[in-house]
Image: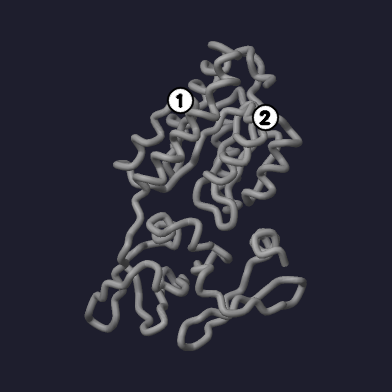
Amino acid sequence: MTGSDSHTPLRCVVVDDEQLAREELCYLLGRVGGVDVVGQASNGVDAIKVIEQNSPDLVMLDIQMPGLTGFEVARRLIDTGLDSQLVFVTAFDRHAIEAFEINAVDYLLKPVEAERLGTAVDRVRRRIQTDRAVTRVQPSADIEKLLQLLAQRQDRREQVAVKVADRFLLVPADDIVHASVEDDVITLVTNSLSGTSNYRTLDELQARLDPAVFWRVHRSHLVNINKIKEIVPWFSRNYLLRMKDAKGAEIPVSRSQTKRLREYLRL
């Protein structure tokens, strides 16, 4: 790593599937100072490539991403020999955050606060300066421990409340076929019913669901990948996902997610 001197800017890669989130984080890093953003990625597959190309000191890594999640990216980096400090960015509830308190990593809660970001950057810089030998040996074991803890403690909902007419029905999370947002209203669809959710955003809903199963294939759509019936080629080499709900809903895949879908399904 190159950022071993306190006057040398930390080389940083920012990974988040939301462009606005990446832009905001880059802006905040500029305010903190002492950090050069040398690369960005919008998904886990590209993140690994960008990190390998740039060998950054620091990776700001979103957790909730369709395809390869932030956790899976961390595992890939461990397998290939990690030489970057990881700071996870998460929408998890505060009571689950204690799982992140491991020396080799740090975390930031969304929405990211400038002061907390500055603390994380300072912590990374101190960690790099203290003992280069330890830094290179320990992260794999410590991050592996973190991932195991998070797998055990992640706050997922086994049931989700769906409002139908004037009633709330509890449905198993795995029964959700897809969720969509329009005019700030989230609609949840299963094989047998359709209703609305009290979650304010798809981000909040997704944070309560299994990230390996529920993919944000479009800014307005979240799908259960186990409930995809058919993948239909669309214009400009994009796709529509025909789902297994009663109406056979067709969900568009955004351009930024199409590459990830191809990578995952070997299309």
Provide the secondary structure element on which disc 2 rests.
loop
**Residue 57 x %, y %:** 63, 26
- Res. 185 visible in picture: no
Name the residue located 40 percent from the left edge and 68 percent from the top edge. 174
| Direction from residue 96 to residue 80 in the image, left or right | right
**Residue 139 x %, y %:** 54, 26
What colour scheme does the image use? one colour
Viewer-proximal residue among 188 and 8: 188
Q: What residue type is disc 2 on?
A: Pro
Viewer-proximal residue among 109 and 191: 191
Number of the label disc, if any, that sits on residue 56: 2
- CA gap, disc 2 and disc 1: 19 Å
Q: What residue type is disc 1 on?
A: Thr
Label 1: few (<14), some (14–19) or many (≥20) C-alpha neighbours in 10 Å: some
The residue at which mark 1 appears reads as: 119
Please identify the residue farthest to the bottom as the structure is shown: 247
Name the residue located 71 percent from the left edge and 40 percent from the top edge. 50
| Direction from residue 65 to residue 232 in the image, left or right | right
